[in-house]
Image (spheres, coloured by chain):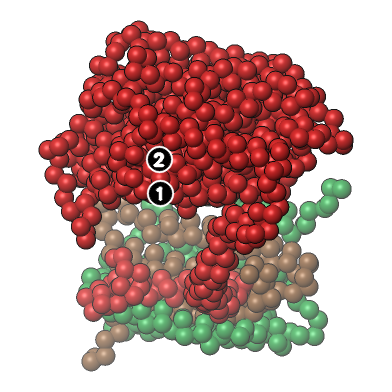
Chain colours: A brown, B green, C red
Amino acid sequence: MSFNLSVGLPHYLLVAAMLFCFGLYGVFSKKNAIAVLMSLELMLNAVNINLVAFNRFLFNKPIDVQGVKHYLLAGHVSAIFVIVVAAAEVAVGLALVITMYRNRLSTNVDELDWLKW
Amino acid sequence: MGDIVGGLVFLVFALLTVFSAFMVVSSKNIIHSALFLALSFVGVASLYVLMDADFLAAVQILVYGGAVAIMVVFGVMLTLRAGKVQESNPDSRNAVFGAIAALLTFVTFALVLFSNENWRVLADQSGMPSTVGDISWLLLTKFMVPFEVAAVLLTIAMIGAIILAKGVEDSK
Amino acid sequence: MHASFQWAWLIPLMPLLSFLIIAFVTKKWPRLSSTISIICILTSFVLAVWIGYGVLTTGDQLVEKPYQHTLNWLTFNNVPWGLSEGSLNIEFGTLVDPLTAMMLFVVTLVASMVQIYSVGYMHGDKGFSRYFAYQSLFAMSMLGLVLATNFLQLFLFWELVGLCSYLLIGFWFFKVSAREAAKKAFITTRVGDFGLLLGILFLLNKFGTLNFFKLHEMIGPQFNNAVVVGGISYLTLTAFLVFIGPVGKSGQFPLHVWLPDAMEGPTPVSALIHAATMVVAGVFLVARVFFLFKASPATMEFISYLGCFTALFAATIAVAQDDIKRILAYSTLSQLGYMMMALGLGAMTASMFHLMTHAFFKALMFLGAGSVIHALHEKQNIWDMGGLWKKMKITGTTFFIGVLAIAGVPGLSGFFSKDEILTAAYHNNIILYVVASFTAFLTAFYMSRLFFVAFTGDEKPENHPHESPWMMTLPLIILAVLSVVGGYVALPEHGFGYFVRPWGSEYEVEHMNYLVAGISTVLGLSGIGLAYLVYNRKAISADNIVATFPRTYKVLQNKYYVDELYLWIIKNIVDGFGKVLYWFDIYVVDGIINALGFLAKFFGSLFRRAQTGQLQVYAMVIFVSIVIMFLVITFGEQQLSALIPFLGGVK
């Protein structure tokens, strides 16, 4: 077959980049604060894909530790931490949005402009 | 043949993920966005599976597809004003600039990606075995302190979120 | 060297101490303040007498090399100019020679007399303590000036003297005229100080030292007096600049205007300023650096003519004045002119001698005038007085002694000192001699006029004069005695001239020139006689004379319109120039600044739009900036490095 469909690191990275940039667009352009939070989640996911992909394709050889074979899964562990932080962020962020909504009856980010001049 | 199957599977899930992500930011209905977000999370989980990250895929489904997506839906519900669901996720005035900035970022990423020869690695056939054991090994040895800190962080975030959402009553 | 010399620094220190004590501790208790002040100045006086005794016993070796007791004050290394070897030392110390001793004696004596007198005169004044604090400070400044070893130290005290005169003239600061007079005195003398400071810098530049005696040794006959510009040598220029200081301080012609106005201060202050301290500071300075002036004949000539002119000029004004203190002030100007003329003629001894006798009799007359003013409750016009002699015997008698002394009646101090000056003029320049002699005649005339109008004649019924308390009459008596006997120190057997003479000069015995003495006696007596005829006997009507020369009288009464001229110059030329500068300042300088400010404001209003307050915009800007930085650093370092200067310059 002339058509090589072999999947490698660049493909995953490209997917992650697209995900990240969609998230970025959402963060920049959405009025609704919850939409902004969702976009942030997309970006964090993109980062996670990158971490896992690098771990999978560049550090996939087991090492020998005291006679036992171990894979160095630092990427996975980092992704777990990112998930932890993302969960915390979502919780706090949504709480903030709800507080804001309660005080202002609005979740529009572009109305949050009192911090100027 | 395995290449073709693997490639097609990747293509399907990658397209699913990216399309869902696109819909998250482009849908005018915030509820649709939330649902597409959940779908995107699932797509990412399937990509994890393709990268032999079984534990992470499970965590992704549980935490993102379950908890975060549900929380977002709850947030939407709590802040949604009646009768405006169709227009509940509008773009701001800066949408065009945001698109340009995002595009510029993407081009940059693409440039980095394609110009870096060290990253042109294709999958080898030696897949990883189950990752849970090695993740736990790392978490309980080298990353023990961050692990504990993460636990504390989650607790604090939970308390903070409850206080914020509940609102502080005026003491006087 | 006599043991007393090393204690000379105590003399200015005592009044300083008293000033500090009064200012910080005893200000609330006037009697205590005055007592402290007087005790301190009397201590200084005793020390001055001790030093004077020391000088007398040491002999004339002090004239060859004065005693100096110095501390290092300022040191500058690697000085680029001057003859010194790369470093400049300025010391702070005391210099004792006969001139200093004489000045110390005169200053402390007059200051003591004035302070004792002031206890009576200033009695009940609200600022009694403040007054004595200023008096002490003034005495300290003047004594420090007299003892200075170098130009910088002298300049310091010179300015302090100016400051104190400002404080004392403006002592009654609630009076507008006093305030104005204080400012006038300060500013006018500042004009002169400007020249003095320039002169000091010229000296520093050329010689690299400011010590008087070192300068004296350098400006010897071997000194190469190079011509600077247009036939004016460096030393002439320097001496001229230095002389501008004394012109201001000693009230010589163009800068004399402050001195008559300074009469706004309390009368004892006038006595202090116009007899012994501030105004003679200039004469003293010229005498102190006499070597410098001697090296420049052109300057000497200028000084002599200027002094002579001032003497005549002030004497003619004095003839037409009615205010008792103003007459005395113009008389002071005139006598200072005499001293300057003597210095210009090279007769430093005669000048210093006249300085001393003048200090005695002018202090006496000012204090007498103060006594009169005190008795008549602040009346100063002599035509409001009259017949005072009968009521104020001591004041009248002592004042009369002063008049006789200044008029040059034989046997009194003024006769000897004025005679020495006239002799010097007679030997050197006959024109100056004639003018000076005429001035002597005028002096005798206007002083007698003052005396006859104020003290003799009919009593004015509205006046109820009474003799002043003993604290005021005692100084009068002491000063009167000194005015009589003060002249005898100059007799060859008493040796004033043996001690007080320029450094390194030969002592020449001055014999009395009987021709000059005779003429001046005749002139003095005829001046008194004329005044007697006009103002006592009324044999000649003064009104008729005035009516004959109304213009002249008016010009004289208005002091030759010098003040008006200055006012005109200031109002038209200086103010006009000021207006031009003001315009320039407002429209050009301020215009530039305002334009800059407007520009900043404009850009501010422009860029303030960047602060939208919207988090998304901030996030976008931050992110795009990071991306751009990343691109520059990663890909474009070579290509984009040309842009780096525009992006902030630092790589």
Q: Say whether residue C386 is left or right of residue C187.
A: right
Q: Say whether residue C228 is left or right of residue C528.
A: left
Q: Which mark is residue C590?
A: none
Circle 1 SS class: helix
- Mark 2 lies on residue: C340
Q: Say whether residue C307 is left or right of residue C372.
A: left
- Mark 1 lies on residue: C306
Q: Residue at x 71, y 42 (%)?
A: C538
How far apart marks 2 and 1 lie (CA) works out to 8 Å
Q: Position of residue C21 (x, y in %)?
A: 61, 20
Q: Residue at x 85, y 30 (%)?
A: C464
Observer-nearest of C290 and C4: C290
Q: Position of residue C282 (x, y in %)?
A: 43, 38
Say if labels 2 and 1 share a chain: yes
The quarter holding residue C597 reads: bottom right
Would you call the spot at circle 1 few (<14 residues within 10 Å), some (14-19), or many (20 or more)? many
Observer-nearest of C271 and C151: C271
Q: Amino acid at mark 1?
A: Leu
Q: Position of residue C324 (x, y in %)?
A: 67, 39
Would you call the spot at circle 2 few (<14 residues within 10 Å), some (14-19), or many (20 or more)? many
Say above or below: C387 vs B170: above
Say above or below: C125 vs C434: above
Circle 2 SS class: helix
Mark closer to the chain start, 2 or 1: 1
Label 2 marks a residue whose chain is C
